[in-house]
Amino acid sequence: MRILFLNDAFPGRLGALAACLAADPQHEVLFASSHCRQGFSLPGVRRVLLKKSKNTSTGQNRDAFEQEWSWALKVGRLSLSSLLKLRAMNFTPDMVLTASAKGHAFFVRQVFPEAFYVSYLDDIFSPTCITDRYSDRVLLRHLLQSGCLTQSQLFFVFSHWQKLFFPAFVRKAIEVVPFFADTDFFCAEQSGPFYCGEVNLSAVPELVSFSVTGVNAERGKVLCFMVMALLRRRPHCHVLLSGVGPEFKARLDAVVSRLSGEEAARLHCAGFLPLREYRDLLCASAAHIRLDVTDGRLGELLEIMSCETLLMTLPHAAPESAGILRPGENMLFCPEAPAEEIYRRLEEMLSRPEAFNTLRANARKTALAFRQQDILSRHAVRLLKAYRQWKDGELCNVS
């Protein structure tokens, strides 16, 4: 069976599924993408790098939607060129899987009209998109994903709330992929030392890390308070901020200016980390704090818990998180309270070694219940069963 993955990035969200399907020697799996992680490969998965499109429009005399549409069309045409070359080389897939709303699948039906077509919701459809759903960018991506939905034999989202992007009358046709975490990768046994510059933060007495990506101004104040409190009140504690971009730099400079030289020396910053370094950071951290919107990223939270790291995050509104995130038992929630109260809850847990270690063990145990290999194996069975049923129906129609 020939299987084609078509996506913006490799491995992206679908890489693990490609590896799962490629584990069957009867499957020939090819992954076509515009971008790929350097030096990364998956066993049994062949890669094709699509031509890249750069949005070089100046925007003069064109509205934003038209610019986005033109760019997506260009992406689609470049993908079309690559797909036609694959067909000319006698690669005709039995199944096509895509998760891109950037135009990559624009013409896939024209090139491979007889393939079984499976679509997944693009990563752009995050909780913040619900409030921004009528922006030109989100409207266009939604239009492209709706086109995928109407052409697909199967259409999947990654959370129940993501169905809200579609009208009620089509939601029954949309399935939800169970969330999962790569617990074999995100574990202390696989990790190495984490360095920030020349400092080995795996060797310090205590490390608390924060993700600053997506943190708004109000939560940024809470984050800065907690950083200063940890450095001033816990003299052996080091703090690392990950995902620091230019927009957060001004806030960070204000924090550093209020610290002593010794305290500032225990504050570390990093940009967006490669996956292995991110895993090593989690395993080195006693606690990892997420103050961004996390309703659609339960899998990411399970990755943190899989590293036996104390997760502290905002209350999770997604219905599927009920019974999984259990504050005080396998993680901590940031309450709707002053920053001092949030810090107090964190420090209280860090100061109780027995309770802290029990919570960490419970976090790992929770994550293991959503082991990626187990979840994706069942999902692959679902795909192959649907394919066989569709193929049998197609043969019956021909006869």
Image (tube, rainbow, N blue to C red):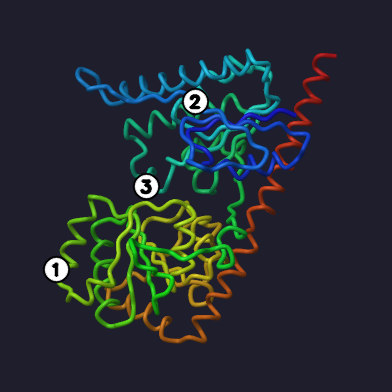
Read off the residue under disc 1. 257
Check the image and report above or below for 208 versus 126: below
Q: Nearer the viewer, residue 201 or 393?
A: 201
Q: Earlier in the sequence, mark 2 or mark 3?
A: 2
Q: Nearer the viewer, residue 321 or 247?
A: 247
Residue 223 is left or right of residue 184, and the answer is left
- For marks 2 and 1, give the CA distance: 47 Å
- For marks 1 and 3, give the CA distance: 32 Å
Q: Earlier in the sequence, mark 2 or mark 1?
A: 2
Q: Position of residue 106 (x, y in %)?
A: 50, 21
Quadrant of the drawing holding the N terminus: top right
- For marks 2 and 3, give the CA distance: 29 Å
Q: Which secondary structure lies at badge 3?
A: helix
Q: Nearer the viewer, residue 168 or 152?
A: 152
Check the image and report above or below for 13 versus 225: above
Amino acid, disc 1:
Ser
**Residue name at image x 27 percent, y 73 percent:** 338
Picture quadrant where residue 90 is located: top right
Read off the residue under disc 3. 128
Q: Position of residue 44 (x, y in %)?
A: 68, 38
| Callouts 2 and 1 close, C-beta under 8 Å | no
**Residue name at image x 74 percent, y 42 percent:** 381
**Residue name at image x 24 percent, y 55 percent:** 248
Read off the residue under disc 2. 50
Q: Which secondary structure lies at badge 2?
A: loop
